[in-house]
Amino acid sequence: MKVPQPFQYQGSKRALAATILQYLPPKVQRVVEPFAGSAAFSLACAARGRAKEYWLNDYNKPLAELLGLIINHPERIADFYKAIWRKENSNALEHYYRVREEFNRTQDPKLLLYLLARCVKGSVRYNSEGLFNQSPDKRRLGTRPETMRENITTISMLLRGITIVTAQDYQDVLKNCQDTDLVYMDPPYQGVCGERDSRYLTGISFDNFVDTLDHLNARGVRYLISYDGRLGAQTYGESLPDSLRLTLVEIEAGRSSQATLLGRDDVTFESLYLSETLSEAVGALPRTHHRDPTSQIRLFEPPSKYGKIFQRVS
C-alpha cells in the first residue's frame, strides 16, 4: 500500500524508509521513535506490519499532540483542517499569518497542521524565542481537505490502538526502552549554519547523546540512528566514537536541491548507524546503497565517518 504522510516535513525519512526497513529483524514487539517528527519511519513499519506496537515521542509538544489527534481523533482534526483551509480567499497570505500568530499565542496543535501543510517546503522554522516563524509557500495553498482527510484516516487505521504518543525528553524515553524494542532515532542537529538550528526548539548535547547510547548498549537495546551524512566529498559534524561499536551504512538520497540549482552533480548520502546488537541480529555489514541498481555496492569497506553536529555543553 502507498504509505500516507500526515504533512510535509523537511528531513523526513519517508523516501528512505524502505531501505532502512531492510535492517529490522523479522519480529519486533515495539518500534520507538524518540524524535518522531512526522512519524515517517513508524508509518512505513505499520504499513508493512513490521511491529506490534509503536511509541512516538517528540519534545515539540504541539507536534506530538498533533500526531495524537491524527491517530486517535481523525474526524475531529480533518474537520478542523477543512474549516480553516476553506477560509482561504484572495487574502490567502494574510490568512496564513493570522493562523501563525494564533498558533504562537495558543500552541493549538490543530493550527500547526495547517501551518505545516502551507509553509515553504514543509520546512519548520522557529526563532530564538521558540515561535514558529516560517513563511507561507506563495505557489500553493496546501494539501486539499479531501486529500488530507484520506491521509489522516489511513494513518489512524494503521496506528490507532497500538500507539502511544508522548512529548518527553528523549533520554526519559530511552530509559524506559527494553531489549525487545527497536529504537529508531533521527535526532536534531545544528547543521552547518551556525550555533543554532532554527528547525528545532532545542538542541541536544553531543556528550549526553553518546552517554545515552552507551547505556543502551549496556542494556542490549537495539537501535538505528539516521544522520545527515555527506554531500559529495564534503562531510559534516563530529563522528560518534568507535567505542560504541556501530555499523555505518550509507544510503544515496540523490542530488540536493542546492546542487541542482548550481548545475552541480553532488549527490547526497544519508548515514544510518546500527547498534552492535542489531547488526549481529540482522547480519549487517558496512555498505553503501545506491539509487541506481547498476551502481556497484561497496561491501566490507567502511564508509567515511561523520555525524551530526550537536550542541556541546561545558
Image: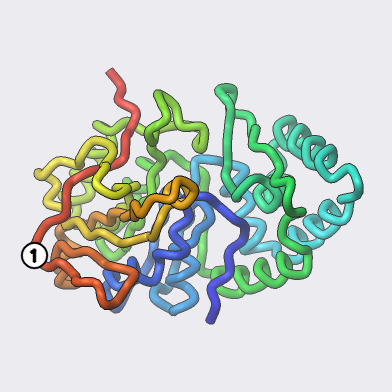
Where residue 128 sits, quadrant-wise, is top right
Judged left or right of residue 122, residue 19 is left
Q: From this viewpoint, which residue is outermost toward the front?
A: 263
Q: Position of residue 178 (x, y in %)?
A: 29, 58
Q: Position of residue 192 (x, y in %)?
A: 37, 33
| Mark 1 secondary-structure assignment | loop
Q: Answer above or below: position of 238 versus 298.
A: above
Q: Is residue 110 visible?
A: no
User: Residue at point 58% right, 32% down?
Assistant: 126
Judged left or right of residue 285, residue 37 is right
User: Residue at point 66% right, 66% down?
Assistant: 152
User: Residue at point 33% right, 57% down?
Assistant: 183
The colouring scheme, among rainbow, by chain, secondary structure or one colour, is rainbow
Q: From this viewpoint, which residue is outermost toward the top?
A: 314
Where residue 297 sits, quadrant-wise, is bottom left
Q: Answer above or below: position of 20 versus 208.
A: below
Q: Answer above or below: position of 306 versus 101.
A: below
Q: Position of residue 298 (x, y in %)?
A: 15, 66
Crowding at mark 1 (Cα within 10 Å: few <14, some 14-19, many 20+): few
User: Residue at point 47% right, 63% down?
Assistant: 14
* Residue type at tag 1: Phe
Q: Answer above or below: position of 133 versus 313.
A: below
Q: From this viewpoint, which residue is outermost toward the bottom?
A: 1
Quadrant that contains the C terminus = top left
Residue topped by disc 1 = 300
Q: From this viewpoint, which residue is outermost toward the right?
A: 90
Judged left or right of residue 34, residue 230 is left
